[in-house]
Image (cartoon, rainbow, N blue to C red):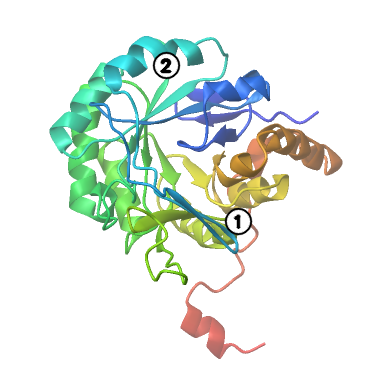
Amino acid sequence: MVDLSVRIGDITLQNPITPASGAFSWEYNDVIDLNRLGGLVAKTICREPRLGNPTPRMAETEAGIIQSIGLPGKGIEYFVDHIVPEYARFKPPLIVSVSSENTEDFAALAEELSVPDVDVIEANISCPTRNATGGNFAMHEEHTKEVIGAIRAKTNKPLWVKLSPNAGDIVSIARAAEEAGADALCIANTFLSLKIRTDNFRPALGNKFGGLVSPALKPIVLRMVYQVAKVVKIPVIGIGGVTKAEDVVEYMLAGASAVGIGYAGFRNPTALITIIDDLAAWCDERGIKKVTDLIGAVKDDDMEMDTLVAASAGV
């Protein structure tokens, strides 16, 4: 039987399957056994209660959904007093996603969340639906380094940083987060998108723009995970388009230590457990004793990385 456990810094996950923030709640325990997951990832919280973005908040596309929820919630005090105890009933580590509009408050929130039942703080510096232009800390190296450095100074909890696929150079952003003290990188948040209704010529979402989640995005995020994993020393969690065990394997081969699953859980709440079982079966069928043997194991050492050189070599 394969050993599915993975290490993300100081945290051990019993398997590499976690939900993506915003696509999960402890209430999923009514449908699946949450104790089987690698980690539990709470929806992003902010300091003050938020109503979220105007409706409509979701729009279907041919290959996924565009969502613009806007981080609704009841604020940090309610979260610590009422939500954290709900998650504390389960065995997997609790990863708490947090967001703010300024560096000082981001750091203060992380400090206030540094309570015993919170195992990891995920700094969501990349939510495209909080800012209608998609502009967040993760769009710029200096902003990333500033906010992550400030958070790092206020908490000793493991710090995971969620990056944006909308950044022009995600590798540079990843380096900046690592240098500022990140313990792991979550790649990536949703893709800033737009849908226009043809019946009334108006944007389909009340916030105009939204974040696209779709299985079709996996090759793009996979490329980002591969590129980042080649240059950073900290673990990477791949998030985007995972719907089956082979997707997990592909992300791990590219360099990810774990994955986050959102869309598949929306479509089928039992998908995460199925993927865990299928991943174990996939490894057992191939005699793989430790799933960690897959991390970064893509066989590409003999391939030319310079595209101009590769193209000139012919076939």
Query: Looking at numbered disc 1 in the image, what kind of residue is underneath it?
Result: Pro
Residue 85 vs 73, above or below: the answer is above
Q: Amino acid at mark 2?
A: Ile
- Tell me the quarter of the picture where residue 279 sits: top right
Residue 134 x/y as whole percent: 29, 55
Identity of the residue furthest to the left in this view:
104
Q: Based on the displayed image, in which of its 4 quarters is residue 79 positioned? A: top left
User: Which residue does the image show at 54% across and 24% down from the upper left?
Assistant: 12
Q: Is residue 175 visible?
A: yes
Is 179 on the left or on the right of 200, as rendered? Answer: left
49 in relation to 264, above or below: above
Q: CA distance from mark 2 to mark 1?
A: 30 Å
Q: Relative to residue 8, is residue 64 depicted above or below?
A: below
Q: Is residue 229 left or right of residue 51?
A: right
Q: Position of residue 46 (x, y in %)?
A: 28, 30
The residue carrying mark 2 is 83
Q: Residue at x 55, y 86 (%)?
A: 311
Q: Is residue 2 left or right of residue 24?
A: right
Left or right, 23 with respect to 153, comes to right
Q: Looking at the image, is mark 2 or mark 1 earlier in the sequence? A: 2
Rate crowding at label 2 as few (under 14), some (14 to 19) or many (20 or more) other CA atoms within 10 Å.
some
Question: Which quarter of the rendered picture does the C terminus lie within?
Answer: bottom right
Q: Which residue is mark 1?
A: 215
Q: Residue furthest front?
A: 200
Q: Nearer the viewer, residue 222 or 312?
A: 222
